[in-house]
Amino acid sequence: MRVVKLLEDRIREDGQVLGADVLKVDNFLNHQIDPDLMTALGEEFHRRFADAPLTKILTVESSGIAPALATGMAFHVPVVFARKHKSLTLKDDLYTATVYSFTKKTSNNVSISKKFLSADDNVLIIDDFLANGQAVEGLIEIIAQAGATLSGVGIVIEKSFQKGRALLDERQIKVESLARIKEFKDGQVIFEED
Ligand code: G4P
Ligand code: NA
Ligand code: NA
């Protein structure tokens, strides 16, 4: 698959492995953004979820927005990003879920205005990374609060050795990850089926 190869090559070339389990991709995804690569990723998600009657793409700010927007452009549906905030203020015009980050060891609330998600919506979740799956779990909780339908989850870079993928598989959610990392070995990225 051309796009998968393009992304894997880019990760090999510009990704930096930090410690045991973090991949830094500031050069094309998390700080500087490559628009042509995002366009190609969006078109690939469109191809993989073409059968879903989508009305909305959902993600979490900030790093999910670029691939989510590219996907929304391919489907011609709106993109909604959940906003992060500290856990105190609960407002009744918001759907809210608590997301624990194992990486940062902090909890944040993520919220979406009730104006932008309803029981009529059929949703595709897009995110940059799938690690422990807590961000995606939070979005799934919000989709349930809205009574909306989840069609699947599209991930740019999955770290298959962390528990997020297994969690979503257990729940029989359709997951399409474009790059699937099996492990980091001596500072190198090893992809699944390498
Ligand atoms: P989880 O959502 O899968 O549970 O992820 P986790 O709590 O482990 O990670 C927290 C943040 O770190 C998330 O971004 C997630 O996208 C990101 N992340 C996880 N693993 C990696 C990695 O190997 N490399 C990079 N670059 N990011 C990783 P966030 O806190 O929501 O921040 P942002 O979207 O504002 O960047
Ligand atoms: Na993210
Ligand atoms: Na991130």
Image: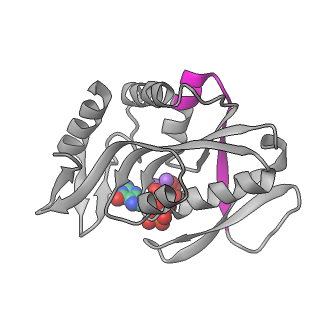
Residue at left 34%, top 39%? Answer: 28
Looking at the image, is 2 positioned above or below residue 187?
above
Residue 125 shows in this picture? no
Which span is picked out in magenta? 71-85
Residue at left offset 67%, top offset 64%: 85
Give residue 106's position: percent from left, percent from top.
Answer: 54, 76
Q: Position of residue 121 (x, y in %)?
A: 75, 38
* Residue drawn at point x = 63 percent, y = 61 percent: 138
Q: Position of residue 63 (x, y in %)?
A: 49, 48
82 within the magenta span: yes
Q: Tell me the colour scheme of the image.
A: one colour
* In front of the other: 17 or 44: 44
Q: Is residue 58 left or right of residue 64?
A: right
Residue 121 is covered by the magenta coloring: no
Q: Is residue 85 left or right of residue 8?
A: right
Q: Does 184 sit above or below residue 71?
A: below
> Which residue is more in the foreground, 155 or 85?
155
- Residue furthest out toward the left: 186
Which residue occupies 74% across, 62% down? 96
Q: Seen from this angle, which residue lies furthest right?
A: 92
How many numbered marks does the figure carry?
0
Q: Is residue 87 visible?
A: yes
The location of residue 98, given as percent across then percent down, is: 66, 69
**In which quadrant will I find the C terminus?**
top left
